[in-house]
Image (cartoon, rainbow, N blue to C red):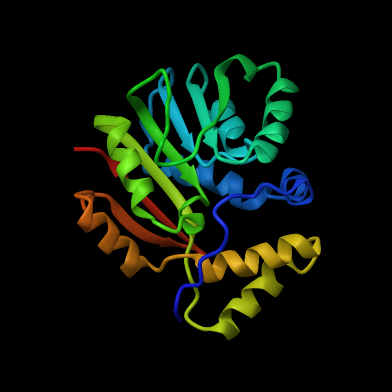
Amino acid sequence: MKRVPEPELMHGIDQARAYAFADFEAPHSNFIKQFANTFPEYKTGRYVLDLGCGTGDISIRFAEAYGACRVHGIDGSNTMLSFGKRAVTRNPQIRYRIRLFSETLPTISLNRKKYDTIISNSLLHHLHNPYVLWNTIKQFTSPGAEVFVMDLRRPDTMTDTRIMREKYTANEPEILQRDFYNSLLAAFDTKEIKEQLSNTGLDHLSVKPEGDRHVIICGKMK
């Protein structure tokens, strides 16, 4: 099934609010779980860059899971970030270890030039040019840095896409059902991701399916 790109940014207030209050407990807790499984000896106190942090839920969960780490999250939507910044402020245990910035790939301007770890959840499928993600990862890491990217993977058929929408979003607001369906169509398959990594010299990273709808790209930078 051919990929159908979707808008890169979510600027609408209704869309941002829907994401801020949606139930992402299962996929987001699984993100942290799979990171821990991938890097079981991960050290705290590291600087972490969260690419496409949206409303900040993954950034918050990561900071809670790994004490003393510093998380810098970036996103191109100020609307999404506004919900994220409020969520960070409401969490006194981690709010001084998280900073969220309005930045758009590939033109990122941060005071810190290198990060110990880069994470990203559900950004890749939004990008019209996926190489900006991989090149950003190369730009902001040094050898040995952990990379953990999790995203949707495109189903084989339109029928599979409709079945997956019903399975995972039947009880969600219509706007989330629509976005999930469009995101599945916009996602890359594992073959396409492997080709992207090969073309950017990141083919040492592993690409593995996760469940029936996600893919994980992970490893340490050379």
Instruction: Return the x and y of residue 27 as percentages of the image width and height.
Output: 60, 52
Q: Residue furthest front?
A: 107
How many labels, in total?
A: 0
Q: Nearer the viewer, residue 132 or 209?
A: 132
Instruction: Return the x and y of residue 70 as percentages of the image width and height.
Output: 49, 20
Tell me the residue at 36%/60% (across/down): 208
Instruction: Return the x and y of residue 115 as percentages of the image width and height.
Output: 36, 26
139 to the left or right of 94: left
2 to the left or right of 116: right
**182 relative to 196, above or below:** below
Instruction: Return the x and y of residue 131 as percentages of the image width and height.
Output: 33, 52
Q: Nearer the viewer, residue 107 or 133?
A: 107
Q: Quadrant of the N terminus?
A: bottom left
Q: Quadrant of residue 199?
A: bottom left
23 to the left or right of 146: right
**152 relative to 103, above or below:** below
180 to the left or right of 143: right
Tell me the residue at 42%/47% (across/down): 149
Tell me the residue at 64%/50% (across/down): 10
Q: Quadrant of residue 137?
A: top left
Q: Is residue 28 at all visible to an observer of this figure?
A: yes
Q: Quadrant of the C terminus?
A: top left
Q: Nearer the viewer, residue 25 or 57?
A: 57
Tell me the residue at 61%/68% (across/down): 182
Q: Is residue 212 at all visible to an observer of this figure?
A: no
Q: Quadrant of residue 117?
A: top left
